[in-house]
Structure formats: structure tokens, C-alpha cells
Amino acid sequence: MTTVTTHQAEDDARNESILIYVNGKLVPKSEATVSVYDSGFMLGDGVWEGLRLYNGTWAFLDAHLDRLFEAAKAVDLNIGHDRNGVKNALFETQTANDMTTDAHARLMITRGTKIRPFQHPSLSRSGPTFVIIMEHSRPKIPRPIRLATVPHLRGLPMTQDPKLNSHSKLNCILACIAAEKAGADEALMLDVHGFVNTTNACNFFIVRKGEVWTSTGDYCMNGITRQKVIDLCRANGIPVFERNFSLVDTYGADESFLTGTFGAQTPVCHIDGRQIGDGRMGPVTERLRSLYKDMIMEECA
């Protein structure tokens, strides 16, 4: 069976002629480059944020900017712009690419160009590198996702806090590779206590007897879509629990789905070779998808 990813999108020829924002300039895709001395290229020293455009509005923009600036503060990185400056760069890139809906933006800020190829942050002296890649992007995930549990953990905050949207994603990439080697699409990652946590790219939910379960949130990305799903459950009488649960609980689930800015709610059909429910999108997932679409319509009217 062909591998599917949670960020699979329709091909769109317009993406070959997009303009990319690089340090205040809009340049063609073929000319959008950074230095080999850039901190992000050299060491993964940077933070990023992904946003989606619906009906001319960037969904939950303030929440995304909150997360971006909190991450930058945590790693002592000066973005070089205030919130309005980041918004203006986003809107400028959107206008230049004539995008109105079904677009995805990736904002990336690194510590900038180093004077020597070594780790210490003081070697980055020219200010941050700020890039926005904006593409026409309509999700096209042809079937539910297959997951495989991997030995790679989303770990303790004193190593690399999993709440950071950092450029240092090697742990998650290794997890994804391990899952693909096992014949799955993406990785299901446990926390340091062995409880089910998250996938390498998305937050993870199960449904058992009408109840929606997700991890405690202690060891996963503080997902904006994750929180919106929790909020929707609470507002619509769907029991929801942020709790520890095991693979035994997971294998016996009636439904499972992933959340993320790109795919919103993506159903899961198999975990470690075990079919979840009937292997298709379940009724609770379908209802949450509908409620989320309504929320987007209201947010991005």
C-alpha cells in the first residue's frame, strides 16, 4: 500500500511561480536562498509556525503568533519584528501571491548568519533570518492514516521541550523513518512514562464509547487545532479527557484521529497492524470535522 502523509496536498502548478519572503524581499522560488552559515541550516537553531488561509483570513492568527513569540522568547531569539511587523510580512506575501483561500504559510525565523561554523549563539551577529513560504494548498489525503509505535519518545522539557516548534526536528524525523520501515505512514510516539502521546507530525486522539481521549499535553506540541477540538467537545456535550492512556486502550478504541493546522482532523485506520473500529472515519470524528468547519466559517467569514 502506498505511503500517505498527513501533509499530502493536491498538485498545484501555481506553486512553481510563487514569491517567497526572505528578510523583507519577495523573490522567486528559484532565488529564495539563505547562507550556508545560517544558524537554521547549520544547527536547526530557529522557530517556525504554520498557518492556513480560509476565505481571505488566516485562521486563529493571534493564537499562532502567541505561540511563535513564546517559542522565540524561550530560545532567546529576537524575531526582529513586533506582532504587527510579522502580520504585515504575512499579508505582504499573501498579496504578492494573490492568495485568497486554500493556502498554507510556513513562517521560519532562525538566529541568522554565523561568522564561524560553530554552535555558540554569540556567533550569530547579523540579526535573524526571516522567511515565509506560502503555497496554494488543498489537503488531499486519500485514505485514513496507518500508524506504527516507535521507540523514539517525545521527551522531558529539560532535554528539548516538545512544546517548541523548533527547526530541530530530527527526533521526529527519525520516528517517521522508523514508522515507514515498519510499513506505516507515520509514527505513534509514547511519552517518557510509556503512555500514548502524539505522532511525529500531529496530535493524537482516540474515541472510546463516545468519549474523546487525548494525552495530558505534558509531552506534546501545544497544538492550536488540538485545543480547538477540545473546546468544541466541551461546547457541544462531547465528553473529552486529557489523560494518560496506554497502547491497550488505543488498540481497543472505536475511532482515532489526528489534529494539525494543515489537515484539521485526519482519521486513523490502523495502529501497529490493528484495525481501529471499522477502519474508516468514525461518527465522532465526522461530527468534530463538521463542527470545526463551522468554527472556521465563523472565524474566517
Image (spheres, rainbow, N blue to C red):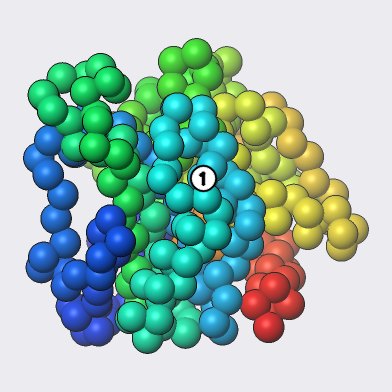
- Kind of residue at badge 1: Leu
Q: Which residue is mark 1?
A: 68
Where residue 122 sits in the image (x, y, percent)? Answer: 27, 20
Q: Residue at x 34, y 69 (%)?
A: 134
Q: Which percent across, then down, holds residue 83? A: 55, 54
Res. 248 visible in picture = yes
Q: Quadrant of residue 204?
A: top right
Estimate how packed mark 1 is, as few (under 14), some (14 to 19) or many (20 or more) residues with alpha carbons within 10 Å.
many
Specify the quadrant of the image occupied by residue 145.
bottom left
- Whether residue 241 sits left or right of residue 159 in the image: it is right
Q: Is residue 207 above or below residue 187?
A: below
Residue 267 shows in the view: no
Task: Estimate the x, y position of residue 64 in percent, counting from the top left.
Answer: 57, 53
Is residue 179 rendered to the left or right of residue 296?
left
Residue drawn at x 42%, y 43% is 79
Tell me: residue 300, above or below residue 247: below
Image quadrant occupied by the N terminus: bottom left
- Labels in figure, total: 1
Left or right placement of residue 57 versus residue 86 in this view? right
Left or right of residue 250, residue 291 in this image: right
Q: Residue at x 55, y 59 (%)?
A: 84
Residue found 68% across the figure and 68% down from its top: 292
Compare residues 198 and 36 and report the one nearer the observer: 36
Percent position (x, y) of residue 263? 49, 63
101 or 79, nearer to the observer:
79
Image quadrant holding the C terminus, namely bottom right
Q: Is residue 23 positioned above or below 28 on the image?
A: above
